[in-house]
Image: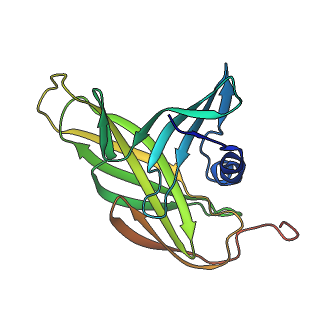
């Protein structure tokens, strides 16, 4: 069994997760649960990562969900997105929402986490699909719509792009999107 010291990792993830609206890590009854971990290749690559504190004071990985994997009868993949709409408010500061729609291939879908990362002027976003394996589901298309905010407060005026599960587009902020004096 491999034991690691994850305190530096947890501290490094806290500001990013709070800034993106994800739930913060939770420590309860000797278990530390981190809602999402990004990799360079994939936003939201690991989800619901759980570590157990051992008697020796080390953290032992207990469980996780990995994008594109099936563990037991549960799988995690990308939700099938067919359309992305940008919704911007007319008020200041500007708020930007993405409204995504698509259809699951069966009648037993479960929308998973939405995770986002901003690099340069591009938002990389994953909308996850949690599914169950081995349970019969009706073979019907199940449409969905999900609207979520982008973390645009504090951004400079300019053009921004997004990639949601492979569907791309752009939007523009006409002015700097923060109150004068804010960091």
Image point (59%, 44%), residue name = 22
Q: Position of residue 8 (x, y in %)?
A: 71, 50
Farthest right residue?
Answer: 181
Q: With respect to residue 175, does 65 lie above or below?
A: above
Front in this rendered view, residue 106 or 96:
106
Q: Quadrant of the C terminus?
A: bottom right
Side of 59 relative to 100 (left or right): right
Image point (65%, 37%), residue name = 25
Farthest top residue?
Answer: 29
Q: Position of residue 106 (x, y in %)?
A: 18, 34
Image point (47%, 47%), residue name = 114
Farthest bottom residue?
Answer: 158
Q: With respect to residue 86, does 78 lie above or below?
A: above
Q: Position of residue 101 (x, y in %)?
A: 32, 50
Image point (50%, 36%), residue name = 48
Side of 10 relative to 89 (left or right): right
Farthest left residue?
Answer: 139
Colouring scheme applied when the structure was drawn:
rainbow
- Residue 119 image-quadrant placement: bottom right
Q: With respect to residue 3, does 73 lie above or below?
A: above
Q: With respect to residue 17, does 25 lie above or below?
A: above
């Amino acid at each position: 069994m491999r034991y690691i010291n994850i305190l530096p990792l947890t501290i490094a993830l806290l500001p990013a997760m709070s800034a993106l609206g994800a739930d913060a890590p939770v420590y309860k009854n000797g278990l530390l649960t981190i809602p999402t971990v990004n990799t360079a290749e994939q936003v939201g690559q690991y989800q619901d990562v759980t570590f157990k504190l051992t008697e020796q004071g080390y953290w032992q990985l207990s469980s996780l969900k990995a994008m594109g994997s099936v563990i037991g009868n549960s799988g995690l993949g990308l939700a099938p997105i067919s359309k992305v709409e940008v919704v911007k408010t007319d008020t200041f500061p500007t708020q930007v929402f993405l409204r995504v729609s698509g259809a699951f291939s069966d009648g037993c879908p479960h929308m998973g986490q939405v995770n986002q990362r901003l690099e340069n002027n591009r938002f990389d976003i994953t909308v996850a699909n949690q599914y169950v394996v081995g349970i019969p589901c009706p073979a019907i298309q199940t449409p969905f719509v999900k609207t979520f905010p982008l973390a645009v407060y504090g951004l400079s005026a300019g053009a921004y792009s997004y990639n949601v599960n492979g569907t791309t587009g752009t939007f523009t902020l006409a002015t700097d999107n923060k109150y004068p004096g804010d960091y």
